[in-house]
Image (cartoon, grey):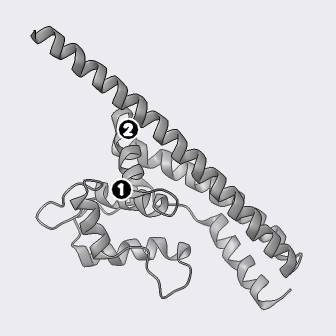
Amino acid sequence: MSEAAEQISKWAEEIEEYSSVDWERLPEIYLYMDQVLTYMNKQLSLFERNESTGLLTSSMINNYVKDGVLPRPEQKKYSREHLAMLMVICMLKQVLSIQDISSLLKTLLEDASKDEMYRRFCEAHSVALKEVGDRVRSTAGEGDAELTRLAIELSIEAAARRTAAERILSELAAEQEKAAKAEKGKGEKKEK
């Protein structure tokens, strides 16, 4: 097995064993921005392309707040709700636009509390990571050519799944917009 295959196999094992921090284990105390960055980048380190690239910066967090994707901090302090939302945002931003993530989170939070939405996210995330980790680990022993084949398969699958997710969100948003216009039209007719 090549050195690259060994490193990939090791990473795949870590991915299979990874699980997002349970809601109950997220810090209960409020954190300042630098503490949030330290905490989140530690949680997300397994998903970095290399060790020098962080998945989250203070500018990103500020933009998420400004765009309404993340609630405003309370006196510059962030709660467990913020940390949970940041975990979800950081994972989803790899495949969805911030606008799509915002829409998705708003819709999900209409039907569930933040802790329930986060639990559902963690379950789906864990299942996906175990499946991918198993595929990567089992292929790592077959050689570099097979790893390259798997990389293209995973890339194609990721593109197809991203396209499906975007289409679903687009169609649902169009339906919601249509319903909102119809409701507005009813309200205007009643006023006349």
Report the side of 48 relative to 105 (left or right): right
Residue 44 position in % (x across, y down)? 47, 71
**Distance between mark 1 and mark 2 Cα atoms:** 14 Å
What kind of residue is marked 2?
Thr
Quadrant assignment for the N terminus? bottom right
Please tell me how crowded label 1 is: few (under 14), some (14-19), or many (20+) other residues with Cα within 10 Å: some
- Residue 73 badge: none
Left or right, 78 with respect to 45, comes to left
Residue 17 percent location from the top left of the image:
63, 65
Q: Amino acid at mark 1?
A: Met
Which residue is under mark 1? 85
Residue lying farthest to the bottom in this orientation: 3
Which residue is labeled 2 in the image? 107
Residue displayed at 76% across by 63% down = 153
**x 43%, y 79%: residue:** 54
- In which image quadrant can residue 167 be found? top right
Q: Tell whether 58 sits left or right of 156.
A: left
The tag earlier along the polypeptide, 1 or 2, is 1
Residue displayed at 38% across by 73% down: 56
Picture quadrant of residue 138: bottom right
